[in-house]
Image (tube, rainbow, N blue to C red):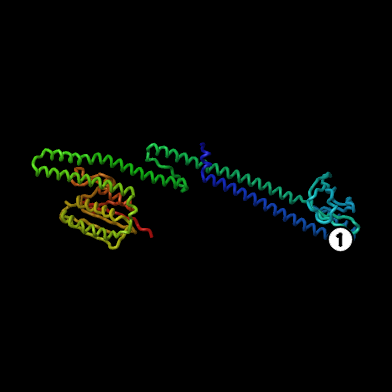
């Protein structure tokens, strides 16, 4: 199908054509109606003028007889734009007047002529020209017939002028509509071509491509923006899948290798205590693998939005207070002092399980990396509001995370501890990031202090402001 065939199948183009046709019909009807109304008014004015003229001629005859009537007719016949005057005998033969001839039968009937009639008058050049007129015929006492008429050239010329104006207006309107239609259609075709080209590259596997947006905010832009958002989401999910696949192959190879080696060592051991210790090590490695896969599954569920329907009103102040009570013995065992600054009664709309899991991940990370900062070190939990946003912060005074590394640590399996001396899977912050995206918020990382030796880390879950 050619480009214009595609264009004519567009709903917008069809509606435009329908509106143009409807406007043309309404304009034609309006002009015809106005023309007919104006012509009727002119004819009525002509008839009223002739009625007055007939009354004047009859009055002149009544007052002064034939001679006064003829003098009045002769005087008025010489005036510019004069009416038609005819004096005829009882048989209809013309005796006097300012016309050369009239259509046969016009003088036979007294009163108004039923239809416009043809008549010939003496032209200025001496010839005879044919015109149309309307008239009133009356009979005087001696049987003579008098015709007083009016030329209909003005109404006819008015009708012709309006018809020409209508044709010109419709022609201009049609030409303008075609030009606008062509311009809009050409622009639409170009945009469709650009969309098609971008779609072809996307279908070829290049998900970094985006559909063009002109900035006009029309239907094409809204559709392109929605599809671009979808493509961005798909690209992010594919990138996450690729990253997970690479990281699983890389990061799970070591624990699987240790698991196999411990199983092989268990086969070579003869004493029960050594074999038991080997089996316990295998169970520990297996638990770590299970925890890793559970974390991956949880992240996948969160990113897929399968838990979005479970969003309810949550008292985040009470949730953080419960977590602080739960982790207080663990922080003391790690040599930290747990300090809380929780504003009461702060609520968010979210999933309690996910918020609790994200908070637990932040607390465990803080304990893990700040536990060796000294006996006097603190771990601070804070709940506050700012400009309507709800801020849940976990602050420690450990080694912190450099500013140029913060975008990396929220990715899956990324661990800044290259030696892997700290236990973990590298999925904790990735899960927190996914949970905050599901809640429409964000995860903010910053230094706790300005001390370059122990800057600490403040991880803040920022929940969006509630709509009024």
Looking at the rendered image, the quarter that the C terminus falls into is bottom left
Q: Quadrant location of residue 75?
A: bottom right
- In the image, taking residue 52 as reference, residue 253 lies left or right, namely left
Q: Position of residue 383 (x, y in %)?
A: 27, 59
- Left of 404 or right of it: where is 108? right
Question: Would residue 440 be visible to someone looking at this image?
Answer: no
Query: Considering the numbered disc 1 on the image, is that residue within a helix, a strand or a loop?
Result: helix
Neighbourhood count class around disc 1 (C-alpha, 10 Å): few under 14, some 14–19, many 20 upward = some
Residue at left offset 15%, top offset 38%: 264
Q: Residue 210 in the image: state x and y as whole percent.
A: 40, 42
Q: Is residue 14 left or right of residue 137?
A: left
Question: Between residues 14 and 192, which one lies in front from this camera angle?
Answer: 14
- Along the line of sight, which residue is nearer the eye, 460 or 117? 117
Q: Position of residue 144 (x, y in %)?
A: 89, 55
Give the residue number, with chain letter if any, for mark 1: 60
**Residue 12, above or below 143:** above
- Residue 293 appears in the picture as rendered: yes
- Farthest-out residue, right: 142
The residue drawn where x is 44% and y is 46% is: 223
Classify residue 408 by image quadrant.
top left
Along the line of sight, the residue nearer the viewer: 351 or 436:
351
């Amino acid at each position: 199908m050619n480009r214009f065939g595609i264009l004519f199948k567009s709903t917008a183009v069809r509606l435009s054509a329908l509106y143009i046709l409807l406007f043309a019909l309404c304009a034609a009807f309006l002009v015809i109606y106005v023309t007919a109304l104006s012509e009727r008014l002119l004819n009525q004015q002509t008839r009223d003028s002739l009625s007055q003229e007939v009354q004047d001629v009859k009055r002149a005859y009544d007052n002064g007889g034939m001679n006064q009537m003829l003098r009045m007719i002769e005087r008025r016949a010489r005036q510019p734009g004069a009416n038609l005057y005819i004096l005829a005998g009882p048989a209809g033969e013309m005796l006097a007047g300012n016309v050369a001839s009239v259509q046969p039968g016009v003088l036979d009937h007294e009163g108004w002529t039923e239809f416009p009639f043809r008549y010939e008058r003496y032209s200025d050049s001496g010839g005879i020209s044919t015109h149309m007129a309307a008239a009133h015929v009356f009979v005087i006492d001696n049987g003579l017939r008098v015709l007083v008429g009016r030329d209909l050239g003005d109404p006819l010329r008015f009708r012709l002028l309006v018809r020409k104006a209508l044709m010109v207006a419709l022609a201009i309107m049609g030409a303008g509509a075609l030009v606008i239609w062509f311009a809009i259609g050409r622009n639409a075709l170009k945009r469709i071509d650009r969309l098609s080209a971008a779609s072809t590259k996307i279908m070829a596997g290049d998900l970094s491509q985006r559909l063009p947006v002109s900035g006009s905010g029309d239907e094409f832009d809204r559709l392109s923006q929605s599809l671009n958002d979808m493509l961005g989401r798909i690209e992010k999910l594919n990138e996450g899948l690729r990253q997970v696949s690479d990281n699983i192959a890389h990061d799970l190879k070591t624990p699987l290798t240790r698991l196999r080696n411990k199983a092989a060592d268990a086969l070579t051991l003869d004493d029960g205590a050594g074999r038991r210790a080997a089996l316990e090590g295998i169970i520990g490695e297996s638990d770590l693998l299970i925890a890793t896969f559970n974390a991956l599954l949880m992240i996948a569920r969160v990113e897929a939005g399968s838990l979005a329907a479970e969003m309810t009103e949550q008292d985040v102040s009470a949730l953080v207070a419960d977590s602080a009570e739960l982790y207080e013995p663990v922080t003391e065992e790690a040599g930290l002092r747990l300090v809380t600054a929780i504003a009461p009664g702060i609520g968010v709309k979210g999933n309690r399980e996910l918020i609790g899991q994200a908070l637990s991940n932040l607390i465990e990370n803080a304990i893990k990396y700040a536990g060796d900062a000294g006996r006097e070190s603190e771990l601070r939990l804070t709940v506050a509001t700012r400009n309507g946003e709800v801020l849940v912060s976990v602050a420690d005074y450990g080694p912190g995370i450099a500013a140029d590394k913060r975008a990396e640590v929220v990715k899956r399996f990324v661990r800044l501890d290259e030696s892997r001396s700290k236990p973990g899977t590298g999925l904790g912050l990735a899960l927190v990031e996914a949970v905050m995206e599901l809640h429409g918020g964000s995860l903010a990382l910053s230094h706790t202090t300005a001390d370059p030796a122990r800057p600490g880390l403040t991880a803040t879950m920022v929940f969006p402001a509630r709509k009024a």
